[in-house]
Image: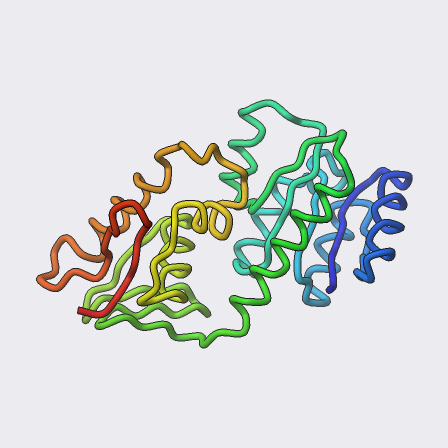
Amino acid sequence: MQILLVEDDPKLAGFIRKGFLGEQINLEIAYDGLMGKRLCEQRKFDAIILDVNLPGINGFDLCIFIKNKWPQTPVMLLTALGMLQDKVLGNKAGADDYLTKPFEFEELLSRIKTLARKNNSFSSHAKILQVGDLVLNTDNQHVRRGDIAIELTKREYELLEYLMHNKGKIVSRADILDRVWDLHFDANSNVIDVYINYLRRKIDKNFTEKLLHTITGRGYTLREP
């Protein structure tokens, strides 16, 4: 497992490196945003951990850069900024997870392993996903149903991609929260239902054959008609 840590505190970076080495995880460290950007351009990482208050390029801007160029690479923001608005900014930047300092190493380790597994599972799949006449290209993130191009937000795209990877299977709300959001939302939140409805309006509403189905009490499934 190859992880990049962009952190300007050498003591904290050393602490994390020591813990990761004990788990046989290779950790590359950059001590400022510019160095982190260069390393991202030079090699592929299974997941990236970013501090927010970085010299050179701050963590939010670096996260945006990474997600624009390598959207499947998971990014965790690791920062002392714990206010709600900071987490919202991290979400808008495309972060897959957000951990506030101080933190327990075991929690960091568990979350980064989850992110890396998600990245590896997606990268092993085909670049073209298809359910009926709905086609998704994971390289350029273009989505079409028949001859009609479908415009999706980042989160709608990630939700659809996850459902298409699991076509024909029933996925629970908890599965979606864990694999698509990775931000530890309240399990009782209706955010999943809201985004399922957003997605349904875009891929099903104007088509005779419906692909996205709610399975009462169990979750959702995307299946061919």
Give the quadrant of the N terminus: bottom right
Tell which residue pokes out farthest to the left in this image. 208
Residue 131: image location, x then y, percent: 28, 70
* Snapshot colouring: rainbow
Tell me the residue at 72%/43% (across/down): 108
Quadrant housing the C terminus: bottom left
Please tell me which residue is depicted at 82% across the width and 62% down the height of the picture. Answer: 24
In the depicted structure, whether residue 219 falls above or below residue 58? below
Q: What percent of the width, then of the height, locates residue 16? A: 83, 46
x and y percent of residue 33 in the render? 74, 46
Q: Nearer the viewer, residue 104 or 6?
A: 104
The outermost residue toward the top is 83
Q: Nearer the viewer, residue 62 or 158?
A: 158
* Relative vertical location of residue 91 with respect to residue 27 in this rendering, above or below: above
- Residue at horizontal 14 percent and vertical 53 percent from the top: 205
Residue 50 at x, y percent in the picture: 70, 44
Viewer-side residue, 203 vs 189: 189
Q: Residue at x 62, y 54 (%)?
A: 114
